[in-house]
Image (cartoon, rainbow, N blue to C red):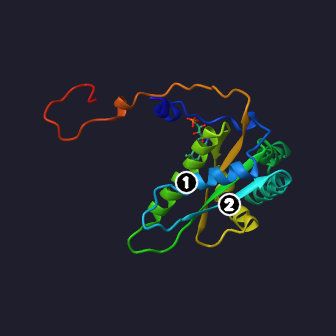
Amino acid sequence: MKELSFLTEHCSYPAKELNDPAPSAEQIEHILQAAMSAPDHGELTPYRFLIIEGEARFRLAEIFAQATLQRNPEVDEATLNKQKNKPLRAPMIITVIANITQNPNIPEIEQILCAGCAAQHIQLACRALGFGSIWLTGANSYDMTVYQALGLDIDERIIGFIYIGTPADKRLKKKRAPAKKITRYWNRSQHTDFAI
Ligand SMILES: Cc1cc2nc3c(=O)[nH]c(=O)nc-3n(C[C@H](O)[C@H](O)[C@H](O)COP(=O)(O)O)c2cc1C
């Protein structure tokens, strides 16, 4: 049950509650190695990572501001500042990028799902090492200005920005809906309200 509670008690933390320290270089290597064991049809490794920390976050802030302005040249200053502040909320961001190749047996959706699993492995590995994280996207994740500035290729997409740091309250608990509410045994002769 201890192993299971690692999963059942997993939760995300608001980015602004993620403080220094970020994982060390050695810890980040372990975290990203954990991501490499995401389920991967055909062993394509259809993802890659960009680590953004320290001063690099300020450059990302400028990119977010530039992209926001291009999306809406009339944007007000408060919104622009909010965008600029986004990357500064946590000490480290790992950008998970799906790297999609044309393959007759492995459709795009499977490659994107694989990249998503890698992102989730990053979150779980962070937790295993005592760090908190949250997976965020938003308009910047789908913006060509951001893609160009971060050096994405034509077949690449941002799956998410994983914000990482040390949470003030490590024992944050969240109430989850019971799985049996959304689960049924298929093709079973006996019907009951609760299938499990
Ligand atoms: C693909 C993806 C994108 C997400 N993007 C956002 C986002 O932009 N903003 C946000 O508040 N939550 C986003 N979330 C949800 C958070 O990562 C997180 O799951 C949510 O805050 C609930 O917390 P929990 O993980 O503890 O249940 C996203 C989740 C996924 C899987």
Ligand 1 picture quarter: top right
Q: Mark 1 and mark 2: span between their CA atoms? A: 22 Å
Q: Position of residue 23 (x, y in %)?
A: 73, 45
Name the residue carrying label 1. 118
Q: Is the residue 16 above or below the residue 51 in the image? A: above
Residue shown at 39% from the left, 32% from the top? 179
Q: Earlier in the sequence, mark 1 or mark 2?
A: 1
Query: Residue flagged by tag 1: what amino acid is it?
Result: Ala
> 93 or 181, which is in the foreground?
93
Q: Secondary structure at mark 2?
A: loop
Q: Is the residue 144 above or below the residue 167 in the image? A: below
Name the residue carrying label 2. 143
Q: Work out which residue is located at the far left of the displayed protein and give it.
A: 189
Q: Secondary structure at mark 1?
A: helix
Q: Position of residue 95 (x, y in %)?
A: 67, 55
Give the quarter of the figure containing the N terminus.
top left
Query: Residue flagged by tag 2: what amino acid is it?
Result: Asp
Tell me if 128 is positioned left or right of 23 in this view: left
